[in-house]
Amino acid sequence: MSFRRQFLKGLWEEIPVFRVVLGMCPTLAVSTSVENGIGMGLAATFVLICSNVAVAALRKIIPPKVRIPCYIVIAATFVTVVDLFMNGFAHALHKSLGIFIPLIVVNCIILGRAEAFAGRNSVWLSLADGLGMGLGFTIALIVVAAIRELSGNGTVTVWGDLRWTLPGYQPALIMILAPGGFVTLGCILGLMNRINAALAARTGRYAAPADFDCRHCVICKWGEEPAP
Amino acid sequence: MLLVLTAFSVASGLVLAWTNAVTRAPIENARRAEFLAALRSVLPACDNDVAADCVAVVEGGRTWTNHVARKGGVYAGAAFRASADGYGGPIELMVGLRADGTVNGLAVVAADRETPGLGSRIKEAAFLDRFKGRSARDARWCAVRKDGGEIDAITGATISSRAVAQAVRAGLEAYAGHAGEIERAP
């Protein structure tokens, strides 16, 4: 298990929002502008790296019975640090992200990686995992936000005044409201499943769809394992 | 088990205490800079310290802090904070007046929970300019047309537009009731 492999898996194979389907709440809530997506993604990445490293470093002394409270304390500490620093040094962004920064604490990705990876791997590999997962989350947020902002507001705001407007376009407002978030995310998840199925078909391997649960569905061809 | 949890909490507390100490000044500065920028953007040209030069008046059960602008020692205008509940949350405004008692400018200090693309358009100059140049002495014009005023609401964002108009109107009425005090303050 190399550093490179652990890093890259977060960008495609196990990209948090599109493949593992974790972190839905912040994705739907803040993806109304690319700027928000970048800010939220980087803040979550920072927390994820710090909490992964801290959990991995302390994994030998954390008693298994109280590991979840310990993980939460670690995550909450780093989130508060980010919250205060962002308030001081990126005030406008802090205002537009609002409640979602404190809510990084309960972002499933943070606890999920601590439990699934950092709690049983070395500091070095956990760093790679945190970095990859964090960047994957950021990329996912940017993709969703770019689609929603462009179609719903006719603009792409990268950072502050660095903004590009689509001339002569009448925005479809619903895309920037809550339903647009679900529609966008649903379409992307469907697309990801299709791409992965196509890739799997080429290599001859079976690929589970993004929600990993096809037991109840008989409609599509992914529901069953291909015959060997 | 107990020991580890206690140790974690103590360590977390220490880290947070340090962060708080480091960030307190920058947060304070950022808030102040934001406040000053809003004040400057709504007040006419002046040369005094507008943040410190204020007159507080009580009207309608709340205290209005009027920041007075002076040029060469002569009263040039005043600005105050106004707020109302918008569609998604509170809307905070800064309202600036000229010496002749007309509205010089409006700035939205906070309206982060308004619907993007609809309510959030109250931040646009096209809407805020509808208040410019109107009189503070008689604020009956200051309501959206649906409420019998003269302000055109933003299409699809009547609630946000109404909140802005109501906030401004309450402030203007407070000003009108105490205009003499504010203008003649030393």
Image: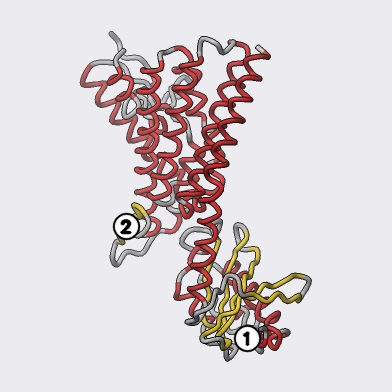
Which quarter of the figure has residue A140?
top left
How many numbered discs? 2
Residue B17, disc: none
Residue A200 appears at what percent x and percent y?
A: 26, 21
Disc 2 to disc 1, C-alpha distance = 37 Å
The kind of residue tagged 2 is: Leu
Callout 2: chain = A
The kind of residue tagged 1 is: Ala
Residue A135 appears at what percent x and percent y?
A: 36, 34
Which quarter of the rendered picture does the N terminus of chain A lie within?
top left
Q: Residue at x 51, y 85 (%)?
A: B71
| Residue corresponding to mark 2 | A162
Callout 1: chain = B
Against A104, residue A165 (above or below) is below
| Residue corresponding to mark 1 | B136
B31 or B109: nearer the viewer: B31
Residue A148 appears at what percent x and percent y?
A: 39, 50
Question: How packed is label 1: few (under 14 Cα within 10 Å), some, or many (20 or more)?
Answer: many
